[in-house]
Amino acid sequence: MSMHLFTPAEQRELRALRTPGRIQRFLDTEIGYNKEPNGPTCRSARMVLRDRIGHCMEGAFLACAALAAHGHTPMLVDLEAVRDDDHVLTVFRERGHWGAIAKSNYASLRYREPVYRTVRELVMSYFEHYHNLAGEKSLRAYSRPVRLSRFGDAWMISEEDVWQIPEYLCTIPHSPVITREMERHLNRLDDRLRASEQVGMQK
């Protein structure tokens, strides 16, 4: 990634986020959740860093920029849901295992330590916590890791929305996480777990 595209001040801020854990804490404590009050947005890492607000896709761009500043390949995985919003993870590998960083308004749809042997293992760690407003467990499929290098520099520094990336994620094949038979027998989310997911939620 070309760090020279960022201003010196932006570079210093990104390089200060030296580990995936620090990046996640920055997303949690310094970046508010974008509920898009004026309509849908898909803002670049620069805009998120400047405005201090982002939803899952926008937070993923910022996390990718911070990871890339320390030599990681910027990659996204799309989680596909039914009767619910999709979710986007920034994924990374350390010592041969996968981890994830994510911006979410739900407590358990965020960071994962790099302890998962495969992307599928990583994705399945989100299954029990991923639910819609009716309490249904809604995660159904996931994409392969997508390298952001294929999209050029727009996701880093554009002053315009970068819709081509989420649009691409919607078109690529996704692998199912459960069968139709499993889906028919799913329980709704336990009330206590559902309440715990809303700790710290921005209403």
Image (cartoon, rainbow, N blue to C red):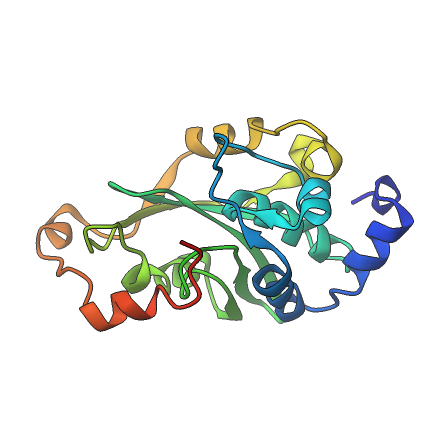
In the shown orientation, is residue 43 left or right of residue 127? right
**Residue at x 40% of width, y 53% of height:** 203
The x, y position of residue 98, in whole percent, is 53, 64
Q: Report how many numbered discs are placed on residues in the image.
A: 0
Above or below, 79 against 164 in this view is below
**Which image quarter is the N terminus in?**
top right
Above or below, 3 against 198 in this view is above
Quadrant of the image occupied by residue 83: top left
In the shown orientation, is residue 139 left or right of residue 96? left
**Residue at x 40% of width, y 58% of height:** 123
Above or below, 202 against 2 in this view is below
The x, y position of residue 104, in whole percent, is 46, 55
Above or below, 75 against 116 in this view is above
Quadrant of the image occupied by residue 192: bottom left
The x, y position of residue 118, in whole percent, is 46, 61
In the shown orientation, is residue 163 left or right of residue 194? right
The x, y position of residue 94, in whole percent, is 62, 68
**Residue at x 40% of width, y 35% of height:** 173
Quadrant of the image occupied by residue 70: bottom right
Q: Nearer the viewer, residue 86 or 201?
A: 201
